[in-house]
Amino acid sequence: MNDDFAKMFAAMMAQGQEMAKAFAPAMEGMDVKGFEKLFPAMSPDMLEMWFGKTFNPDGLDARTRLLVTIAALTVLGAQAEPQMRLTIRQAMAAGATKRHIAEVIWQMSMFGGLPAMQKALEIAQSVFAEDEETKK
């Protein structure tokens, strides 16, 4: 990362933090889990546009990017449950199987610990169960 890019990134982060401080009073009672209802799984084309090869045509596809995100959210632990549920749904829509998702979560036990892995697997299982219910 060059100096100009680092300065631009630092300025963007500072602006974002200031915006968050300004919005915080109005968002005090916000239910983060409500976002799940607003953002159902995206179509494969949208997934590829936002999480796939749009910005780096030779890079990772949407499914792989979402699996990597699941890995990161697993390591974060229970604090990321709404984001984990949404990302699991999106990964499945992008072609990830239940086994892919479970393997990624299991792999993260070495980095986030067994409690983080167990919580992530519980979240994944509940998403899988919801997915089965909607298919009926």
Image (cartoon, rainbow, N blue to C red):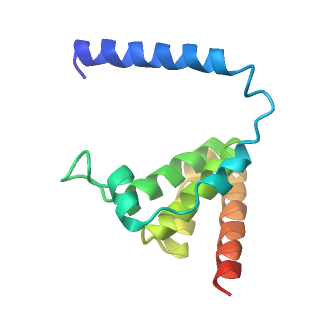
Q: Farthest residue in the right direction?
A: 29
Report the residue at 65% width, 73% height from top: 128
Residue closer to the observer: 23 or 88: 23
User: Residue 108's x, y, as percent?
Assistant: 55, 53
Quarter holding residue 66: bottom left
The quarter in which the C terminus is drawn is bottom right
Q: Is residue 78 visible?
A: no
Q: Quadrant of the N terminus?
A: top left
Residue at 48% from the left image edge and 69% from the top image edge: 93
Q: What residue sits 26% from the left and 50% below the top?
A: 54
Direction left: furthest residue? 58
Q: What residue appears at the point 61 percent right and 48 percent down from the top-left corner?
A: 83
Would you say 55 lies left or right of 99 here? Answer: left
Q: Can you name the residue that lies furthest to the bottom here?
A: 136
Specify whether residue 92 is in view: yes
* Number of numbered discs on residues: 0
Where is residue 92? Give x, y as percent: 50, 69
- Of residue 103 and residue 126, the one placed in the foreground of this image is 126
The front one of 53 and 3 is 53
**Residue 15's x, y, as percent?**
48, 15
Q: On screen, 77 above or below 107?
A: above
Question: Could you tell me residue 30's position as x and y percent?
Answer: 76, 36
